Structure formats: structure tokens, C-alpha cells
Image (spheres, helix red, strand yellow):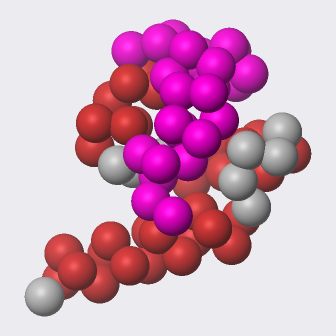
């Protein structure tokens, strides 16, 4: 699952921004860029939004595709 889909499945931008107490615009940028920064992964995992494995798998896939 990509990072944008993780945000959507969690209830979209507003829900994630409230759960993490972050500005809406920041989470909107993550969704647009399909990139959730690693420093937020633990919090997303603790809130059962996504597992660390799901987040890491997409990051690996994205990085591999970008390198090609």
C-alpha cells in the first residue's frame, strides 16, 4: 500500500492531521508527494494506521523505482 493510500484509509488528511496533532497542510503534502517521513512512522503504527512494515515496503519500492 502506498503512503497516499494509507492516509486515505485512515480517514484522509483531516483525520491523520488530528491524530498526529500536525497541520493539515503538512499531511496534505505527504499525500500529494506519496511520502510520509520516517520520523512519523512509529506514531502511525501506534495508532494502528499502518504497520512499520507497510510504511517501509512502500518507501523501498518508491526508492527502487526512483533509482531506475
57 shown above or below 14: below
Drawn side of residue 8 relative to residue 49, left or right: left
Q: Is residue 17 above or below residue 29?
A: above
Residue found at x 32% / y 71%: 62
Q: Is residue 9 left or right of residue 33?
A: right
What residue appears at the point 82 percent right and 46 percent down from the top-left corner? 48
Q: Indicate the position of residue 4 as horizontal and vertical percent values.
A: 42, 45
Q: Residue furthest bottom?
A: 68
Q: Is residue 50 magenta?
A: no
Question: At x 63% / y 68%, what residue is drawn?
Answer: 54
Is 30 on the left or on the right of 14, as rendered? Answer: left
Could you tell me if residue 13 is visible in this image? yes
Q: Main secondary structure of the magenta part?
A: helix
Q: Residue at x 50, y 22 (%)?
A: 13
Q: Is any part of residue 37 visible from this angle? A: no
- In the rendered image, the vertical position of residue 64 relative to residue 27, given as above or below: below
Number of disc labels: 0
Span highlighted in magenta in the image: 1-25
- The quadrant of the rendering that contains the C terminus is bottom left
Placement of 60 over or under 19, stated as above or below: below
> Residue 67 at x, y = what percent?
18, 83
Which quarter of the figure has residue 20?
top right
Tell whether position 11 is magenta.
yes
View extreme (left): residue: 68
Amino acid at each position: 500500500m502506498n503512503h497516499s493510500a494509507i492516509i486515505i484509509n485512515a480517514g484522509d488528511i483531516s483525520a491523520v492531521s488530528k491524530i498526529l496533532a500536525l497541520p493539515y497542510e503538512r499531511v496534505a503534502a505527504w499525500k500529494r508527494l506519496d511520502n510520509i517521513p520516517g520520523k512519523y512512522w512509529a506514531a502511525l503504527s501506534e495508532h494502528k494506521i499502518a504497520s512499520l512494515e507497510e510504511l517501509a515496503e512502500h518507501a523501498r519500492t518508491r526508492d527502487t523505482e526512483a533509482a531506475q
